[in-house]
Structure formats: structure tokens, C-alpha cells
């Protein structure tokens, strides 16, 4: 689970200020943090299929946001991938 403090920290780092929660970079950063926090749960609980569905939906949402960012602004896309240590 992502804490409020961690969410605000990510918002400030990727959005520029505390209020810019809607930018694509902030949304991708928060989704990435949630995905990283959920991954160990699914390594232990292989039969949690309903939870896995939610994780796959988050991954798909992150993928679509990254695709949108790559089409609109390649420099921001590359910076987000580098900062979040995502491959591609």
C-alpha cells in the first residue's frame, strides 16, 4: 500500500509541485510504486487470481499512459523511463 507521504513525494518529484497530481509522469510514478509494492504478494500467493487481475489492469493503465507520453513528448518519455528505472 502506498502511503500519503510517498504519494506526495512522488507528486512533488515528477509533477513539479504538490498540486500537479494529474500529469502523466505523476500517474505513471504512482502506478509503478503500487505495482512494486504488490509484486511480492503475488510471488507468495500464486492462486490470488482476482488480485492478479487488478495488478494486470494497473500494468495496462501504466502501459497506455506511457504510450500516450511517447507519442506526445519523446523527451519526457525517456526521462520518466530513466527516473523510474523501467526498461524499454
Image: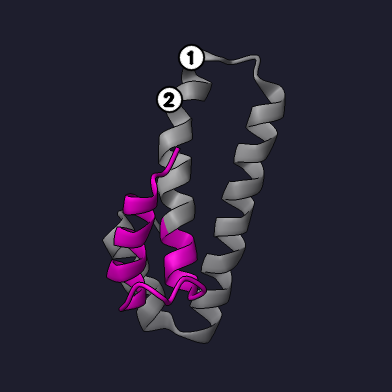
Q: Is residue 86 visible?
A: no
- Residue 24 position, x and y percent, is 49, 72
Viewer-nearest residue: 1 or 85:
1
Does the stretch in magenta take in 2?
A: yes
Magenta stretch: helix, strand or loop mostly: helix
Residue at image point 53% right, 85% down: 72
Above or below residue 79? Residue 82 is: above
Residue 33 placed where, x, y %? Answer: 40, 47
Magenta stretch contains residue 81: no
The residue beneath circle 2 is 40
Q: What is the crowding at mark 1: few (fewer than 14 residues within 10 Å), some, or many (at least 20)?
A: few
Which mark, residue 86? Answer: none
52 vs 80, left or right, is: right
Residue 9 percent coordinates (x, y): 29, 60
Coloring basis for residues: one colour
Name the residue located 65 percent from the left edge and 19 percent from the top edge: 48
Q: Is residue 76 left or right of residue 72?
A: left
Contact between labelled residues 1 and 2, with CB atoms less than 8 Å apart: yes
Quadrant of the image occupied by residue 20: bottom left
Residue 52: x, y in percent?
64, 30
The one nearer the camera, 58 or 4, is: 4
Question: Which residue is denoted by mark 1 in the rendering?
Answer: 44
- Tag 2 secondary structure: helix
The magenta stretch spans which residues?
A: 1-29
Real-space Cα distance between discs 2 and 1?
7 Å
Q: How many marks?
A: 2
Amino acid at each position: 500500500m502506498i502511503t500519503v507521504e510517498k504519494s506526495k513525494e512522488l507528486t512533488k518529484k515528477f509533477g513539479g509541485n504538490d498540486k500537479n497530481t494529474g500529469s502523466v509522469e505523476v500517474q505513471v510514478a504512482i502506478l509503478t510504486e503500487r505495482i512494486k509494492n504488490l509484486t511480492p504478494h503475488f510471488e507468495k500467493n500464486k492462486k490470488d487470481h482476482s488480485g492478479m487481475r487488478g495488478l494486470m489492469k494497473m500494468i495496462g493503465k501504466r502501459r497506455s499512459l506511457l504510450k500516450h507520453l511517447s507519442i506526445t513528448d519523446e523527451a519526457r518519455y525517456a526521462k520518466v523511463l530513466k527516473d523510474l528505472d523501467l526498461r524499454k
